[in-house]
Amino acid sequence: MPVTEINSSDPAPGGADSGGVDAPNLQLFVFALFFIFGGITSLNDVIIPKLKELFTLNYTQAMLVQFCFFTAYLVIGIPGAKLVKKLGYMRGAVAGLLTMMVGCLLFIPASQTATYWVFLLALFVLASGVVVVQVVANPLISLLGKPETAHSRLTFAQAFNSLGTTVFPFFGALLILGSLAKVSADQLSGAELDAYRTAESQAIVHGYLGLAVALAFVAGVVWLFRNRLKGEKHEASVGLAGFDLLKRPRFGFGALCIFLYVGAEVSIGSLIVSYLMQPGVMGLQEQAAGKLIAYYWGGAMIGRFIGSALMRVISPGKLLALVAVGAITLILISTNSSGSVSGYSLLAIGLMNSIMFPTIFALASERLGSRAADGSGIINVAIFGGAVVPLATGALADATGSLGLALALPAICYAVIAAFGIYARRPAAA
């Protein structure tokens, strides 16, 4: 999630000396953006089981939802950062919000044609807008305050992201997974199958149409304040889009961990509904399992509020290693137990995930100085892990016939993250 650098000698954006909006108001605006893009991203966890049933997909095919969504970070990450540099934060936010709105509207033709690849296209466009909005949100919240509290401030902002990921799946499960159909797609064929897919996907369309209206409203409000942020200055990119920074051990290791963390978090979130529906776990119906996704993301929200306070007294690196080991432990408990213990231990991994992204992000970006924009663009590309790791996890589930064995891949990701926490437990050298 890229950070665009503002020189430390310049007044903070929106500060008293900038002639723009005051910092508290600007922080509220950024918190709202975190809430919106967090919630929209988490809706994928609800859509996956729905599309899996509609199009009779295996786990690998179903994970193409996450692949297409997070591929946008690879494709749009660096161009998005350049776009925000050119337009500025507020206009860049409008561009991202409108792109998200277009992605939501593309669900209409996707439903009318009842074609899986059109749904995937809509998700890619939606994600492209999310990437641009993140380019705006992260740097602002990182820069609105003292550098020494950047870790805890970004973690606190990420809690609003988690609030969105908690609220959206709950209502999404009610709307999207609440079908009363007495049949399933694997029992139909031909024209009947096409009609069933079109009818059942209307629930998805209705949800995203509501989001499109809300995004248009928010974009309009932001546009009214497009000239309120003064004193914005952006550093020009250095080298080949900053890829030379990967030669720095701390940054390169951190970028790898962003790749692995997003991949592990998305993999688990994507499999929750299917995992909880298993007879050996909780044996829930689809909608009931979908509602419990809120516990996974809600744990991340609670953990981020707690983590933002803990990191003022505990080394961020040590805390990162501790929660990564905690995530591995919970996976082992879940895969070696049954019933509620198995289900809720998997959901509790959300609490462990809580501080990982902002902490890895901040630790990897320490002392980049004027290269922060380049470095954050690379980290943004690393979020592509959300496309690769879930697809590999789905393929492992299909190959082994076991969701439990497939969770070994996220566990390996957490092990690498724990190693990075130990490695980066001390402040970066000048």
Image (tube, helix red, strand yellow):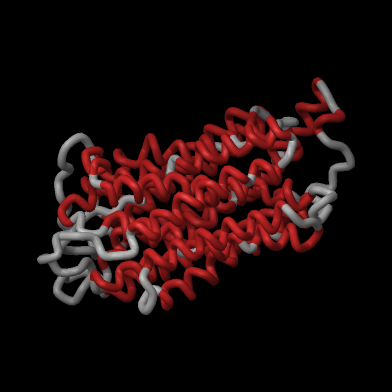
Q: Name the residue: 42% across, 70% down.
A: 156
In the rendered image, the vertical position of residue 117 relative to residue 144, given as above or below: above
Looking at the picture, how far across and down is residue 58, in whole percent?
70, 32
Left or right, 350 with reference to 82: right
Q: Residue furthest top?
A: 190
Residue 98 visible in rendering: no
Q: Name the residue: 36% across, 38% down.
A: 76
Front-lying residue, 345 or 118 = 345
State the image quarter where residue 308 is shown.
bottom left
Q: Name the residue: 28% across, 58% down.
A: 226
Left or right, 21 with reference to 236: right
Looking at the picture, how far across and down is residue 36, in whole percent?
48, 58
Q: Name the residue: 34% across, 48% down.
A: 253
In the rendered image, the vertical position of residue 85 relative to residue 142, given as above or below: above
The quarter of the image holding the C terminus is: bottom left
Looking at the picture, how far across and down is residue 89, in whole percent?
27, 55
In the rendered image, the vertical position of residue 177 relative to residue 221, given as above or below: above
| Marker count (numbered) | 0
Q: Residue furthest right?
A: 182
Residue 242 visible in rendering: yes
Looking at the picture, how far across and down is residue 45, in whole percent?
63, 48
Left or right, 355 with reference to 239: right
Front-lying residue, 49 or 307 = 307
In the rendered image, the vertical position of residue 16 relative to residue 262, given as above or below: below
Front-lying residue, 401 or 146 = 401
